[in-house]
Image (spheres, rainbow, N blue to C red):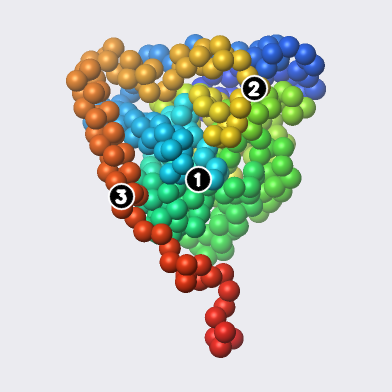
Protein backbone atom coordinates (compact mmCIF):
# COMPACT_ATOMS: atom_id res chain seq x y z
CA UNK A 1 0.00 0.00 0.00
CA UNK A 2 1.33 3.43 -0.90
CA UNK A 3 1.19 5.90 1.93
CA UNK A 4 0.02 9.37 1.08
CA UNK A 5 1.97 12.23 2.54
CA UNK A 6 0.28 12.41 5.92
CA UNK A 7 3.20 10.25 7.04
CA UNK A 8 1.59 7.19 8.36
CA UNK A 9 4.08 4.95 6.63
CA UNK A 10 2.30 1.76 5.68
CA UNK A 11 4.50 -0.74 3.93
CA UNK A 12 4.22 -3.36 1.28
CA UNK A 13 6.69 -5.34 3.40
CA UNK A 14 7.81 -5.43 7.01
CA UNK A 15 7.70 -2.11 8.85
CA UNK A 16 8.60 -3.40 12.28
CA UNK A 17 12.29 -2.62 11.78
CA UNK A 18 11.73 0.95 10.66
CA UNK A 19 14.29 2.23 13.15
CA UNK A 20 14.26 4.44 16.21
CA UNK A 21 12.17 7.57 16.59
CA UNK A 22 13.49 10.96 15.56
CA UNK A 23 16.33 12.13 17.73
CA UNK A 24 17.53 8.65 18.72
CA UNK A 25 21.29 8.32 18.91
CA UNK A 26 23.62 5.36 18.73
CA UNK A 27 25.82 4.88 21.80
CA UNK A 28 29.36 6.19 21.67
CA UNK A 29 31.08 2.90 22.45
CA UNK A 30 30.89 -0.79 21.62
CA UNK A 31 31.13 -2.73 18.39
CA UNK A 32 29.48 -1.55 15.20
CA UNK A 33 26.98 -4.40 15.45
CA UNK A 34 26.05 -3.35 18.99
CA UNK A 35 25.67 0.28 17.96
CA UNK A 36 23.18 -0.61 15.24
CA UNK A 37 21.25 -3.29 17.10
CA UNK A 38 20.87 -1.10 20.19
CA UNK A 39 18.84 1.48 18.24
CA UNK A 40 16.40 -0.92 16.67
CA UNK A 41 17.98 -2.20 13.44
CA UNK A 42 17.17 -5.82 14.22
CA UNK A 43 17.45 -8.56 11.61
CA UNK A 44 13.98 -9.69 10.48
CA UNK A 45 13.19 -13.34 9.84
CA UNK A 46 14.04 -14.63 6.35
CA UNK A 47 11.34 -14.28 3.67
CA UNK A 48 9.02 -17.30 3.57
CA UNK A 49 5.71 -18.37 2.08
CA UNK A 50 4.53 -19.24 -1.43
CA UNK A 51 5.75 -17.35 -4.48
CA UNK A 52 2.67 -16.01 -6.37
CA UNK A 53 4.16 -16.40 -9.85
CA UNK A 54 4.04 -19.05 -12.54
CA UNK A 55 7.09 -21.25 -12.87
CA UNK A 56 8.62 -19.72 -16.05
CA UNK A 57 8.53 -16.20 -14.59
CA UNK A 58 9.86 -17.34 -11.21
CA UNK A 59 12.76 -19.19 -12.82
CA UNK A 60 13.57 -16.16 -14.98
CA UNK A 61 13.76 -14.04 -11.83
CA UNK A 62 15.99 -16.59 -10.13
CA UNK A 63 18.21 -16.79 -13.23
CA UNK A 64 18.74 -13.02 -13.19
CA UNK A 65 19.74 -13.01 -9.52
CA UNK A 66 22.23 -15.78 -10.27
CA UNK A 67 23.59 -13.83 -13.26
CA UNK A 68 24.20 -10.82 -11.00
CA UNK A 69 25.83 -12.88 -8.25
CA UNK A 70 28.19 -14.78 -10.57
CA UNK A 71 29.15 -11.62 -12.46
CA UNK A 72 29.95 -9.77 -9.24
CA UNK A 73 31.93 -12.67 -7.79
CA UNK A 74 34.01 -12.84 -10.95
CA UNK A 75 34.56 -9.08 -10.90
CA UNK A 76 35.97 -9.37 -7.39
CA UNK A 77 38.31 -12.13 -8.55
CA UNK A 78 39.46 -10.10 -11.55
CA UNK A 79 40.04 -7.09 -9.34
CA UNK A 80 42.38 -9.18 -7.21
CA UNK A 81 44.25 -10.07 -10.39
CA UNK A 82 44.46 -6.35 -11.26
CA UNK A 83 42.60 -6.87 -14.51
CA UNK A 84 39.89 -4.52 -13.25
CA UNK A 85 41.33 -1.30 -11.84
CA UNK A 86 40.05 1.77 -10.05
CA UNK A 87 37.05 1.48 -7.77
CA UNK A 88 34.74 -1.52 -7.62
CA UNK A 89 31.50 -1.62 -5.63
CA UNK A 90 29.80 -5.01 -5.53
CA UNK A 91 26.08 -5.78 -5.30
CA UNK A 92 26.39 -9.17 -3.62
CA UNK A 93 23.46 -9.60 -1.21
CA UNK A 94 21.30 -6.92 -2.83
CA UNK A 95 20.29 -8.87 -5.95
CA UNK A 96 16.58 -8.87 -5.13
CA UNK A 97 16.37 -5.07 -5.40
CA UNK A 98 17.55 -4.63 -8.98
CA UNK A 99 15.88 -7.88 -10.10
CA UNK A 100 12.48 -6.93 -8.75
CA UNK A 101 12.65 -3.21 -9.41
CA UNK A 102 13.71 -3.31 -13.06
CA UNK A 103 10.79 -5.61 -13.90
CA UNK A 104 8.35 -2.91 -12.86
CA UNK A 105 9.56 -0.56 -15.61
CA UNK A 106 8.70 -0.08 -19.27
CA UNK A 107 11.22 0.26 -22.13
CA UNK A 108 10.52 4.00 -22.47
CA UNK A 109 11.34 4.70 -18.82
CA UNK A 110 14.62 6.29 -17.73
CA UNK A 111 16.95 4.64 -15.23
CA UNK A 112 19.54 6.52 -13.16
CA UNK A 113 21.78 4.54 -10.81
CA UNK A 114 24.72 4.90 -8.46
CA UNK A 115 28.30 3.65 -8.60
CA UNK A 116 26.99 0.22 -7.44
CA UNK A 117 25.18 -0.25 -10.73
CA UNK A 118 26.42 -3.37 -12.53
CA UNK A 119 23.22 -5.26 -11.72
CA UNK A 120 20.94 -2.45 -12.86
CA UNK A 121 22.81 -2.13 -16.16
CA UNK A 122 22.70 -5.88 -16.78
CA UNK A 123 18.98 -6.23 -16.14
CA UNK A 124 18.17 -3.07 -18.05
CA UNK A 125 19.49 -4.82 -21.13
CA UNK A 126 23.20 -4.04 -21.41
CA UNK A 127 25.12 -7.15 -22.39
CA UNK A 128 27.43 -8.67 -19.83
CA UNK A 129 30.12 -8.51 -22.52
CA UNK A 130 29.85 -4.72 -22.72
CA UNK A 131 29.77 -4.38 -18.94
CA UNK A 132 32.83 -6.56 -18.39
CA UNK A 133 34.76 -4.86 -21.20
CA UNK A 134 33.98 -1.50 -19.60
CA UNK A 135 35.29 -2.67 -16.25
CA UNK A 136 38.45 -3.81 -18.04
CA UNK A 137 38.76 -0.35 -19.60
CA UNK A 138 38.50 -1.71 -23.15
CA UNK A 139 36.97 0.38 -25.93
CA UNK A 140 34.40 -2.35 -26.63
CA UNK A 141 32.83 -1.44 -23.28
CA UNK A 142 29.50 0.37 -23.04
CA UNK A 143 31.30 3.66 -22.33
CA UNK A 144 34.22 2.89 -24.68
CA UNK A 145 36.36 1.99 -21.67
CA UNK A 146 36.39 5.55 -20.38
CA UNK A 147 33.94 5.11 -17.55
CA UNK A 148 34.93 1.92 -15.83
CA UNK A 149 32.91 0.23 -13.11
CA UNK A 150 31.19 3.37 -11.82
CA UNK A 151 30.12 4.90 -15.15
CA UNK A 152 28.18 2.33 -17.13
CA UNK A 153 25.90 4.07 -19.65
CA UNK A 154 23.67 3.09 -22.53
CA UNK A 155 21.46 5.58 -24.30
CA UNK A 156 19.57 2.95 -26.29
CA UNK A 157 18.20 1.33 -23.14
CA UNK A 158 17.74 4.73 -21.48
CA UNK A 159 20.24 3.77 -18.79
CA UNK A 160 21.81 7.07 -17.71
CA UNK A 161 24.54 5.86 -15.36
CA UNK A 162 26.39 5.05 -13.15
CA UNK A 163 27.33 8.11 -11.07
CA UNK A 164 30.36 8.37 -8.81
CA UNK A 165 28.96 11.24 -6.73
CA UNK A 166 26.77 10.33 -3.75
CA UNK A 167 23.35 11.73 -4.57
CA UNK A 168 24.55 12.89 -7.98
CA UNK A 169 21.81 11.04 -9.83
CA UNK A 170 18.96 12.70 -7.95
CA UNK A 171 18.97 16.08 -9.74
CA UNK A 172 19.60 14.29 -13.04
CA UNK A 173 16.44 12.28 -12.46
CA UNK A 174 14.41 15.40 -11.78
CA UNK A 175 15.79 16.91 -14.97
CA UNK A 176 14.95 13.87 -17.08
CA UNK A 177 11.44 13.76 -15.66
CA UNK A 178 10.96 17.48 -16.27
CA UNK A 179 12.07 17.07 -19.88
CA UNK A 180 9.60 14.21 -20.36
CA UNK A 181 6.79 16.21 -18.79
CA UNK A 182 7.43 19.31 -20.90
CA UNK A 183 7.63 17.25 -24.10
CA UNK A 184 4.50 15.26 -23.29
CA UNK A 185 6.42 12.00 -23.30
CA UNK A 186 4.72 9.17 -21.40
CA UNK A 187 7.55 7.85 -19.23
CA UNK A 188 8.77 7.83 -15.68
CA UNK A 189 12.29 8.14 -14.33
CA UNK A 190 13.46 5.77 -11.62
CA UNK A 191 16.38 6.94 -9.53
CA UNK A 192 18.33 4.44 -7.43
CA UNK A 193 20.37 5.74 -4.50
CA UNK A 194 21.54 4.58 -1.10
CA UNK A 195 20.41 5.83 2.28
CA UNK A 196 23.64 7.82 2.56
CA UNK A 197 22.40 10.08 -0.24
CA UNK A 198 19.40 11.07 1.88
CA UNK A 199 21.78 13.24 3.94
CA UNK A 200 22.86 15.17 0.85
CA UNK A 201 21.37 18.47 -0.18
CA UNK A 202 20.74 17.08 -3.65
CA UNK A 203 18.19 14.66 -2.18
CA UNK A 204 16.16 17.44 -0.59
CA UNK A 205 16.42 19.69 -3.63
CA UNK A 206 15.32 16.94 -6.02
CA UNK A 207 12.52 15.78 -3.72
CA UNK A 208 11.25 19.33 -3.30
CA UNK A 209 11.21 20.10 -7.03
CA UNK A 210 9.68 16.74 -7.94
CA UNK A 211 6.84 17.40 -5.48
CA UNK A 212 6.48 21.10 -6.36
CA UNK A 213 6.36 20.52 -10.12
CA UNK A 214 4.70 17.08 -9.90
CA UNK A 215 7.41 15.28 -11.82
CA UNK A 216 7.11 11.56 -12.72
CA UNK A 217 10.04 10.34 -10.62
CA UNK A 218 10.15 7.04 -8.78
CA UNK A 219 12.73 7.57 -6.03
CA UNK A 220 14.13 4.15 -5.06
CA UNK A 221 16.24 4.15 -1.91
CA UNK A 222 18.39 1.03 -1.52
CA UNK A 223 18.85 1.22 2.24
CA UNK A 224 21.70 -1.13 3.16
CA UNK A 225 21.98 0.44 6.64
CA UNK A 226 25.64 1.56 6.47
CA UNK A 227 26.12 4.01 3.57
CA UNK A 228 29.89 3.89 3.01
CA UNK A 229 30.76 2.74 6.50
CA UNK A 230 28.59 4.56 9.03
CA UNK A 231 25.43 3.10 10.53
CA UNK A 232 22.30 5.05 9.69
CA UNK A 233 21.59 5.98 13.31
CA UNK A 234 25.04 7.50 13.66
CA UNK A 235 24.62 9.88 10.75
CA UNK A 236 20.90 10.70 10.60
CA UNK A 237 18.82 12.32 13.36
CA UNK A 238 15.67 11.03 11.62
CA UNK A 239 16.21 7.42 10.62
CA UNK A 240 12.72 6.92 9.19
CA UNK A 241 13.56 7.67 5.56
CA UNK A 242 9.95 7.59 4.45
CA UNK A 243 9.26 10.43 6.90
CA UNK A 244 11.82 12.58 5.08
CA UNK A 245 10.08 12.03 1.75
CA UNK A 246 6.63 12.48 3.28
CA UNK A 247 7.70 15.88 4.61
CA UNK A 248 7.74 17.08 0.99
CA UNK A 249 4.26 15.76 0.34
CA UNK A 250 5.59 12.71 -1.52
CA UNK A 251 3.75 9.39 -1.28
CA UNK A 252 5.88 6.62 0.24
CA UNK A 253 6.10 2.86 0.38
CA UNK A 254 8.47 0.53 2.21
CA UNK A 255 9.31 -3.10 1.40
CA UNK A 256 11.74 -5.86 2.30
CA UNK A 257 14.62 -5.47 -0.14
CA UNK A 258 15.82 -9.02 0.51
CA UNK A 259 12.56 -10.47 -0.84
CA UNK A 260 12.30 -10.19 -4.62
CA UNK A 261 8.53 -10.85 -4.45
CA UNK A 262 8.02 -7.89 -2.10
CA UNK A 263 10.31 -5.66 -4.17
CA UNK A 264 8.43 -6.29 -7.41
CA UNK A 265 5.04 -5.76 -5.75
CA UNK A 266 6.16 -2.48 -4.17
CA UNK A 267 7.74 -1.15 -7.33
CA UNK A 268 4.78 -2.13 -9.52
CA UNK A 269 2.47 -0.33 -7.14
CA UNK A 270 4.69 2.75 -7.00
CA UNK A 271 5.22 2.86 -10.77
CA UNK A 272 1.48 2.56 -11.34
CA UNK A 273 0.83 5.56 -9.08
CA UNK A 274 3.51 7.65 -10.79
CA UNK A 275 1.96 6.89 -14.19
CA UNK A 276 -1.57 7.65 -12.97
CA UNK A 277 -0.84 10.87 -11.10
CA UNK A 278 2.25 12.18 -12.89
CA UNK A 279 3.80 12.93 -9.50
CA UNK A 280 6.67 11.38 -7.52
CA UNK A 281 6.68 8.34 -5.22
CA UNK A 282 9.42 7.36 -2.75
CA UNK A 283 10.19 3.67 -2.18
CA UNK A 284 12.49 2.45 0.59
CA UNK A 285 13.88 -1.06 0.11
CA UNK A 286 15.65 -2.36 3.21
CA UNK A 287 18.54 -4.52 2.03
CA UNK A 288 22.07 -5.50 3.07
CA UNK A 289 25.33 -5.90 1.19
CA UNK A 290 27.38 -8.96 2.09
CA UNK A 291 30.66 -7.50 0.87
CA UNK A 292 32.49 -4.36 1.92
CA UNK A 293 31.47 -0.95 0.58
CA UNK A 294 34.21 -1.18 -2.05
CA UNK A 295 37.30 -3.27 -2.67
CA UNK A 296 39.32 -0.65 -0.75
CA UNK A 297 37.13 -0.91 2.34
CA UNK A 298 38.70 -2.70 5.37
CA UNK A 299 35.16 -3.10 6.77
CA UNK A 300 35.94 -2.30 10.39
CA UNK A 301 32.54 -0.77 11.14
CA UNK A 302 30.40 -3.90 11.46
CA UNK A 303 30.79 -7.21 13.20
CA UNK A 304 31.46 -10.27 11.05
CA UNK A 305 28.81 -12.19 12.95
CA UNK A 306 26.23 -9.60 11.92
CA UNK A 307 27.11 -10.13 8.26
CA UNK A 308 26.74 -13.89 8.67
CA UNK A 309 23.39 -13.43 10.37
CA UNK A 310 22.15 -11.29 7.50
CA UNK A 311 23.25 -13.97 5.04
CA UNK A 312 20.44 -16.15 6.39
CA UNK A 313 18.19 -13.66 4.55
CA UNK A 314 20.16 -14.00 1.31
CA UNK A 315 17.75 -13.30 -1.57
CA UNK A 316 18.91 -16.15 -3.80
CA UNK A 317 18.80 -19.06 -1.39
CA UNK A 318 15.61 -17.93 0.39
CA UNK A 319 13.80 -17.46 -2.93
CA UNK A 320 15.01 -20.79 -4.32
CA UNK A 321 14.02 -22.52 -1.06
CA UNK A 322 10.49 -21.13 -1.39
CA UNK A 323 10.27 -22.34 -4.98
CA UNK A 324 11.48 -25.80 -4.01
CA UNK A 325 8.99 -25.97 -1.16
CA UNK A 326 6.08 -25.40 -3.55
CA UNK A 327 7.41 -27.75 -6.22
CA UNK A 328 8.37 -25.03 -8.72
CA UNK A 329 12.12 -25.74 -8.66
CA UNK A 330 14.24 -28.87 -8.48
CA UNK A 331 17.90 -29.03 -7.56
CA UNK A 332 18.92 -30.02 -11.14
CA UNK A 333 16.98 -27.01 -12.46
CA UNK A 334 18.78 -24.74 -10.00
CA UNK A 335 22.16 -26.14 -10.99
CA UNK A 336 21.32 -25.70 -14.68
CA UNK A 337 20.42 -22.03 -14.15
CA UNK A 338 23.63 -21.51 -12.20
CA UNK A 339 25.67 -23.18 -14.94
CA UNK A 340 24.10 -20.89 -17.53
CA UNK A 341 25.01 -17.85 -15.45
CA UNK A 342 28.60 -19.01 -15.06
CA UNK A 343 28.87 -19.70 -18.79
CA UNK A 344 27.67 -16.17 -19.53
CA UNK A 345 30.30 -14.80 -17.17
CA UNK A 346 33.05 -16.84 -18.82
CA UNK A 347 31.98 -15.54 -22.23
CA UNK A 348 32.00 -11.95 -20.94
CA UNK A 349 35.50 -12.34 -19.53
CA UNK A 350 36.73 -13.80 -22.82
CA UNK A 351 35.15 -10.85 -24.66
CA UNK A 352 36.85 -8.36 -22.34
CA UNK A 353 40.20 -10.15 -22.57
CA UNK A 354 40.03 -10.03 -26.37
CA UNK A 355 39.04 -6.35 -26.34
CA UNK A 356 41.30 -3.54 -27.45
CA UNK A 357 42.70 -0.49 -25.71
CA UNK A 358 41.80 2.93 -27.02
CA UNK A 359 44.62 4.30 -29.22
CA UNK A 360 46.73 6.99 -27.61
CA UNK A 361 45.89 9.22 -30.57
CA UNK A 362 42.22 9.18 -29.47
CA UNK A 363 42.75 10.20 -25.88
CA UNK A 364 41.66 13.79 -26.51
CA UNK A 365 38.62 12.79 -28.55
CA UNK A 366 35.46 14.30 -27.02
CA UNK A 367 37.69 16.20 -24.58
CA UNK A 368 38.97 19.13 -26.65
CA UNK A 369 37.93 20.65 -29.96
CA UNK A 370 40.47 20.00 -32.75
CA UNK A 371 42.23 23.16 -34.03
CA UNK A 372 40.50 24.72 -37.01
CA UNK A 373 37.06 23.30 -36.15
CA UNK A 374 34.35 25.83 -37.18
CA UNK A 375 32.45 27.28 -34.21
Res 223 quadrant in image: top right
Residue bearing mark 1: 85
Q: Are marks 2 and 1 in contact (CB under 8 Å)?
A: no
Q: Which mark is residue 300?
A: 2
Q: Is residue 4 above or below residue 301?
A: below
Task: List the single residue furthest toward the left.
Answer: 332
Kindly identify the residue that appears in the image at 59 percent across and 45 percent down. Answer: 280
> Foreground residue, 191 or 372?
372
Q: CA distance from mark 2 to mark 3?
A: 36 Å
Q: Nearer the viewer, residue 374 or 251?
A: 374
Disc assigned to residue 351: 3
Q: Nearer the viewer, residue 367 or 154?
A: 367
Which residue: 50% across, 54% down? 147
Asked where in the image residue 77 lies, by quadrant, the reply is top left
Q: Which quadrant does the C terminus fall into?
A: bottom right
Classify 10 Å Cα crowding around label 3: few (below 14), some (14-19), many (20 and above): some
Where residue 63 appears, as percent x and y from the top left, is 30, 32
Q: Is residue 140 visible?
A: yes
Kindly indicate whether the residue at mark 3 contacts the one at mark 2 (C-beta within 8 angstroms).
no
- The x, y position of residue 363, in whole percent, is 51, 67
Residue 71 percent coordinates (x, y): 37, 36
Q: Earlier in the sequence, mark 2 or mark 3?
A: 2
Amino acid sequence: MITQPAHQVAGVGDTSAAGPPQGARAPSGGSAAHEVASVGATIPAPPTGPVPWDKPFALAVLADMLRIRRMEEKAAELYGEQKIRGFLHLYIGEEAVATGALRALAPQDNVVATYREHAHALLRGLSMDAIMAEMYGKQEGCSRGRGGSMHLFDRASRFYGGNAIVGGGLPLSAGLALADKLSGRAALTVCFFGEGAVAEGAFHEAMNLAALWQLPVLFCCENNLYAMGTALARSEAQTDLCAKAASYGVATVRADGMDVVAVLAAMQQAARQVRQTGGPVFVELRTYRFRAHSMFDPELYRDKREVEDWKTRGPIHTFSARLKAQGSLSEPEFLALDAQAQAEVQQAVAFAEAGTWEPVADLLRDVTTPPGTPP
